[in-house]
Image (spheres, grey):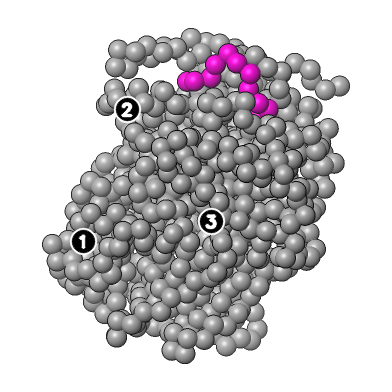
């Protein structure tokens, strides 16, 4: 029998006072006092919290999971049928070998392989399906040594983003005795292949220290190379494509600092230019010259400067690509004779290639209303070829090699949709909604050409809007399942992203955060007004910081939505930003504000935080998803939000919380298991509009 009554979380008073304001948080108890231990050992979760989460899971399964199991399975099989299961990547040459990965039919994880540079017999380097067995397996990547004899590979077994590094002997196929545990993602080898650099977490799960591990030694003997004292900054390690320098990147969301280790001279890291609040920079190297992508000197949309590697301070930076307002430089890659930059202008991406010998430039762009573009060069600096990929909501991904010497494009791979796909059956549109302050908000649409645009179609509106992350107008095999059922699939490119330049990001953070919510609501109203969406069939979806967006727009306009899907939603913003022991809190104060130090920030966050603003009124159907070992959006945020909604809202609409008890921020680890989660969300959307 279905469970008729949802679980009701007990209320336990927990008062806190900040800036003279006392608040009672009756669901604070859902935050495990031993949360650090739970991330590493989920079994350590206190029994009363586990009982509540499992009761919510059982309620979801009885009332939604089982009744819609057939629909979920149908959608899952549709999406899986659009994926070429035995798919191979494109080989990337490095010295005597070409490295690649492939997916095998029926398997969840990649197989890493290599051949000779010009082809020949394939050698399997790492089969992640074997390593994963039946447990959670978060593959953290692999990096072969410069000698090509070893490979460091990383795996997370809990979903908590604690990785273990192992070293595989590529000549024997066996792992060595070297094991480095509980580290962040990423490894960089030294040129002699005798050691590697990695990043270590502090006690609060913040990447703060770079160590060097010498092969054959114990982890406890690893040398500290760099340690960051400010808990508001995260640390990463990389290397220049030329392999001349190790890069130690220290950053929060608005300020960065880079330290370099010369791979020839060795020695201690050297700071390129000391951190300056609000200044960001990153770099690459060529022939002793650093190429710096930065927003220094008021270059809000970034510029490219150069400086000698031996005198790198900002006082010596000289502009190479000057700042141009409205042209956002997203990425720069430097190879032997060329500088490649990925830009966004008028909301659309383009690649510009600059010949560093002559200064001449050429541009790569496409003509669709909306599309996505990416670029890469693989492992090698000494090359005259680079790779770019293109797709649009209607056009499957295509990958090209571009020969810089001849200007010739070579199509290397086109995404195959085994079950069939005709781009001509679908339409892609780019519309603009007018926000309350007059800003024009881009909205990307995908729908079947047979879908009536007369105000009767259901619509799924997706949004994010934080950290300057832009939502690409890319092809999705999943979205077709709703589009084929008559949905208009819409993406609102709200402020907080950088679709319209850095200014678009600046106007969606801190004191301007409400713009993100207003933009999304404006996009929804525009879709209804222009008859792309039925007024009673509009479903909203967002995850992580996009889950904050879901919580806010649900409080602000509950009448507007037929349903809301909130995946690992950041809904307890005020309490999280007040808790400086949590992994992401100090580094995220520049994004949201610091309510511990500023009453203005406290009041502003309190005014929109979804958990704080739940009211006694009718809410639409809501489906919230959480991950028990999630260090980014902790499981208790959606749990507290749902508990408070249950106790407060006045309607009888469905409210579900599903917590992955063995996964983190990204949900299930296998590619097919992830598809099942998507299918479940889509089944909920269909139920909300009466099509389940």
Mark identifier at residue 472: 3
Please report whichever mark, 3 or 1, sits nearer to the chain's N-terminal start.
Answer: 1
**Dot 2: few (<14), some (14–19), or many (≥20) neighbours within 10 Å?**
some
Please report whichever mark, 2 or 1, sits nearer to the chain's N-terminal start.
Answer: 1
Please name whichever residue, 569 or 258, is drawn nearer the observer in this view of the structure: 569
Q: Residue at x 24, y 74 (%)?
A: 289
Please name whichever residue, 133 or 12, is drawn nearer the observer in this view of the structure: 12
Q: Is residue 479 above or below residue 515?
A: below
- Residue mark closest to the camera, 3 vs 1: 3
Which image quarter holds the N terminus? top right
Q: Is residue 486 above or below residue 634?
A: below
Q: CA distance from mark 3 to mark 1?
A: 32 Å
What secondary structure prevails in the magenta region?
Answer: loop
Q: Residue at x 67, y 69 (%)?
A: 415
Q: Is 527 left, or right, of 207 in this rendering?
A: right
Q: Is 361 left, or right, of 372 in this rendering?
A: left
Residues at circles 2 and 1 in contact by the CB criterion of under 8 Å: no
Q: Is residue 219 visible?
A: no
Q: Which residues are magenta?
A: 612-623
Q: Residue at x 61, y 78 (%)?
A: 412
Mark 2: secondary structure: helix
Q: CA distance from mark 2 to mark 3?
A: 31 Å
Whether residue 383 appears in magenta in the rendering, the answer is: no
Mark identifier at residue 272: 1
Mark 3: secondary structure: loop
- The residue that disc 2 covers is 601
């Amino acid at each position: 029998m279905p469970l008729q009554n949802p679980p009701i979380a007990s209320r336990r008073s927990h008062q806190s006072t900040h800036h003279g304001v006392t608040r009672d948080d009756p669901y604070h108890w859902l935050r495990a006092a031993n949360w650090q231990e739970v991330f590493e050992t989920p079994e350590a979760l206190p029994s009363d919290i586990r009982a509540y989460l499992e009761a919510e899971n059982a309620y979801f399964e009885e009332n939604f999971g089982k009744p819609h199991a057939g629909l979920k399975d149908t959608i899952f099989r549709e999406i899986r049928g659009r994926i070429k299961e035995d798919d191979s990547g494109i080989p990337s040459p490095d010295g005597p070998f070409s490295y690649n990965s492939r997916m095998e039919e029926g398997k969840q994880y990649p197989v890493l392989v290599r051949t000779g540079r010009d082809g020949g017999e394939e050698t399997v380097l790492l089969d992640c399906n074997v390593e994963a067995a039946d447990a959670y397996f978060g593959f953290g990547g692999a990096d072969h040594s410069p000698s090509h004899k070893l490979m460091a590979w990383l795996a997370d077994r809990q979903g908590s983003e604690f990785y273990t590094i192992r070293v595989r002997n590529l000549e024997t196929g066996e792992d060595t005795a070297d094991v480095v545990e509980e580290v962040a993602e990423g490894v960089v080898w030294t040129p002699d292949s005798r050691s590697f650099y990695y990043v270590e977490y502090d006690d609060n799960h913040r990447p703060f220290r770079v160590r060097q591990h010498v092969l054959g030694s114990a982890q406890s003997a690893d040398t500290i190379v760099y340690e960051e004292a400010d808990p508001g900054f995260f640390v990463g390690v990389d290397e220049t494509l030329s392999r001349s320098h190790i890069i130690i990147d220290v950053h929060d969301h608005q300020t960065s600092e880079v330290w370099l280790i010369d791979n020839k001279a060795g020695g201690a890291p050297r700071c390129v230019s000391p951190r300056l609040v609000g200044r960001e920079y990153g770099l690459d190297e060529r022939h002793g010259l650093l190429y710096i992508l930065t927003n220094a000197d008021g270059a809000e949309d970034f510029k490219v400067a150069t400086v000698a590697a031996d005198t790198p301070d900002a006082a010596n930076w000289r502009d190479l690509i000057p700042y141009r307002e409205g042209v956002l430089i997203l990425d720069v890659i430097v190879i032997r004779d060329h500088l490649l930059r990925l830009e966004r202008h008028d909301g659309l991406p383009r690649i510009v290639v600059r010949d560093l010998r002559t200064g001449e430039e050429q541009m790569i762009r496409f003509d669709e209303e909306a599309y996505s573009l990416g670029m890469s060069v693989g492992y090698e600096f000494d090359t005259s070829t680079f790779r770019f990929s293109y797709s649009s909501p209607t056009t499957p991904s295509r990958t090209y090699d571009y020969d810089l010497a001849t200007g010739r494009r070579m199509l290397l791979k086109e995404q195959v949709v085994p079950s069939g796909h005709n781009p001509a059956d679908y339409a892609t549109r780019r519309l603009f909604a007018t926000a309350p302050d007059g800003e024009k908000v881009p909205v990307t649409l995908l729908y079947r050409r047979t879908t009536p645009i007369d105000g009767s179609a259901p619509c799924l509106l997706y949004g994010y809007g934080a950290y300057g992350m832009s939502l690409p107008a890319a092809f999705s095999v999943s979205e077709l399942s709703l589009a084929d059922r008559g949905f208009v699939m819409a993406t609102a490119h709200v402020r907080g992203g950088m679709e319209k330049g850095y200014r678009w990001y600046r106007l969606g953070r801190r004191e301007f955060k409400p713009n993100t919510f207003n933009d999304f609501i404006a996009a929804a109203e525009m879709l209804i007004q222009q008859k792309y969406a039925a007024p009673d069939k509009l479903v909203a979806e967002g995850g992580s910081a996009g889950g904050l967006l879901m919580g806010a727009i649900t409080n602000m306009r509950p009448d507007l939505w037929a349903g809301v899907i909130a995946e690992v939603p950041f809904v307890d913003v005020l309490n999280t930003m007040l808790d400086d022991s949590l992994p992401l809190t100090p580094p995220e104060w520049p994004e949201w504000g610091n309510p511990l130090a500023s009453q203005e920030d406290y009041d502003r966050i309190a005014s929109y935080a979804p958990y704080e603003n739940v009211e006694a009124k009718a809410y639409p159907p809501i489906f919230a998803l959480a991950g028990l070992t999630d260090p980014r959006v902790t499981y208790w945020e959606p749990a507290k939000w749902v508990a408070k909604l249950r106790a407060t809202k006045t309607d009888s609409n469905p409210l579900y919380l599903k917590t992955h008890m063995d996964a983190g921020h990204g949900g299930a680890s296998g590619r097919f298991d992830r598809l099942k989660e998507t299918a479940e969300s889509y089944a909920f959307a269909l139920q909300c509009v009466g099509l389940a």
